[in-house]
Amino acid sequence: MITDPNNPADWLLLARDRLEKADAIYERFGPSWTGIEILHEAAERFLKAFLIHHGWNLIRTHDLSRLLAEACNFDNGFDRFAETAQTLTEQFWEQHYPGGDLDEVGQDYSALRESLGIMIAMIEKEITLQ
């Protein structure tokens, strides 16, 4: 299967896969650094699906706050996820390369996942309605 970076459905496919795996890791092992990395990657892909759906030109970034700011240009309802985006991006970088403080990474997985669930529902509703 060859994916298309300009097809929101392909971004959703990859986002859903990562979300499923992040949740499976959390269910099996509890809070983990890997779970946070994969949860972050899922959120990133869901946001990119939304943005590309609206004609946005892909920017290669892992900064969820930046992606969320872009999403607010199309729907200011995304602003309520600013804290989640910032927290998840910070935790992503803490564990992504050695040198970060790992003590708190993943401890708030449930709260982050709950917030992302609301954002994901907004994105999927928007994309599937069009």
Image (cartoon, grey):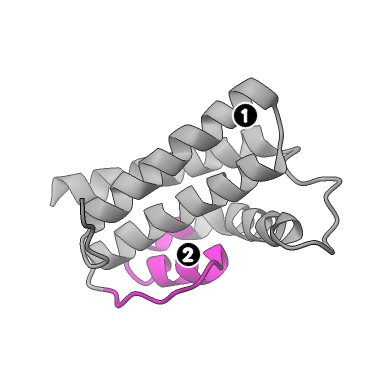
In terms of secondary structure, where does tag 2 sit?
helix
- Per the rendered image, the range of residues in magenta is 56-78
Mark identifier at residue 26:
1
Position of 52 relative to 84 (above/below): below
Horizontally, is 60 left or right of 107 in the view?
left
> In terms of sequence position, does the residue under pointer 1 or pointer 2 come before the other?
1
Mark 1 neighbour density, 10 Å: few (under 14) some (14–19) many (20 or more): some
Residue furthest to the left in view is 130
Mark 2 neighbour density, 10 Å: few (under 14) some (14–19) many (20 or more): many
- Distance, label 1 to label 2, CA atoms, is 24 Å
Q: In percent of the image, x 30 and y 78: which residue is there?
A: 57
In terms of secondary structure, where does tag 1 sit?
helix
Give the amino acid type for the residue marked by disc 1 in the picture.
Tyr
Residue situated in front as seen by the camera: 26 or 127: 26
Give the amino acid type for the residue marked by disc 2 in the picture.
Leu
Position of 117 relative to 88 (above/below): above
Q: Is residue 71 magenta?
A: yes
Horizontally, is 94 left or right of 60 in the view?
right
x%, y% of residue 125?
26, 43
Q: Is residue 51 magenta?
A: no
Mark identifier at residue 68:
2
- Which of the two discs, 1 and 2, sits closer to the camera? 1
Residue 93 falls in image quadrant: bottom right
